[in-house]
Amino acid sequence: NAGVTQTPKFQVLKTGQSMTLQCAQDMNHNSMYWYRQDPGMGLRLIYYSASEGTTDKGEVPNGYNVSRLNKREFSLRLESAAPSQTSVYFCASSELQGALNYGYTFGSGTRLTVV
Amino acid sequence: DAKTTQPPSMDCAEGRAANLPCNHSTISGNEYVYWYRQIHSQGPQYIIHGLKNNETNEMASLIITEDRKSSTLILPHATLRDTAVYYCIVRGYNAGNMLTFGGGTRLMVKP
């Protein structure tokens, strides 16, 4: 009963390095999301994928790219990391069709530090 | 999506009911009220949602006023493990409407 799995859980990058954050869900949800949360702040949406094959920008997309690899997986890529991207990154999924909507299911987060 | 207003912090005694208010005076007819919570360093957790009727599940109760301009999340018997930031979010019920998190209410349950 894994839900949403994010890897890695922790990462330290040097400025200018690139990396990909992985997210997978096993609930057969259509929609997936990437959020970031800075210390003491609420979550802000980076990108989302309403369904397999589609992606759209959220509130803070600059400096990121995403790939919806298949229905299960949604990855977030930092092409050239900057200290301002130091944050906790959360992946989420949801199923909005039908009466049994239990909202979003979130992963446990990836704590990224860019030095 | 309608904007919500929540008190930044609240205290509650362990074993007592915690009543967390939320104002959403600009809510429209097709928008739902959702509640999530975030326990320190973890991903947010869905609690409950509703449209206009009161709702109850194993975690909490949601009371929505008749004019739908405000709501209250009730944790009937708060425990120390309920200490968290609670977010009230209003959004439409379709794939194009995202969850937008505000500041939330930091609930501290005290022994």
Image (cartoon, rainbow, N blue to C red):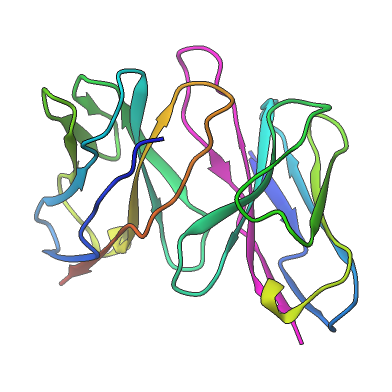
Residue B8 % position (x, y):
24, 65
Residue A105 % position (x, y):
55, 40
Please tell me whether residue A94 belongs to the stretch shown in magenta. yes
Residue A69 % position (x, y):
88, 37
- Residue plotted at (66% across, 30% down): A31
Q: Is residue A35 visible?
A: yes
| Number of marks in the rendered image | 0
- Residue plotted at (15% across, 72% down): B111
**Relative to residue B75, is residue A20 depicted above or below?**
below
| Closest to the observer, B80 or B61 | B61
**Relative to residue B24, is residue B104 depicted above or below?**
below
| Closest to the observer, A100 or B99 | B99
Residue A85 % position (x, y):
70, 72
**Residue extending furthest toward the bottom:** A115
**Relative to residue A53, is residue B70 depicted above or below?**
below
Image quadrant occupied by the N terminus of chain B: top left
B52 displayed left or right of A108: left
Q: Is residue A2 visible?
A: no
Please tell me whether residue B38 belongs to the stretch shown in magenta. no
Which stretch is magenta? Answer: A86-115
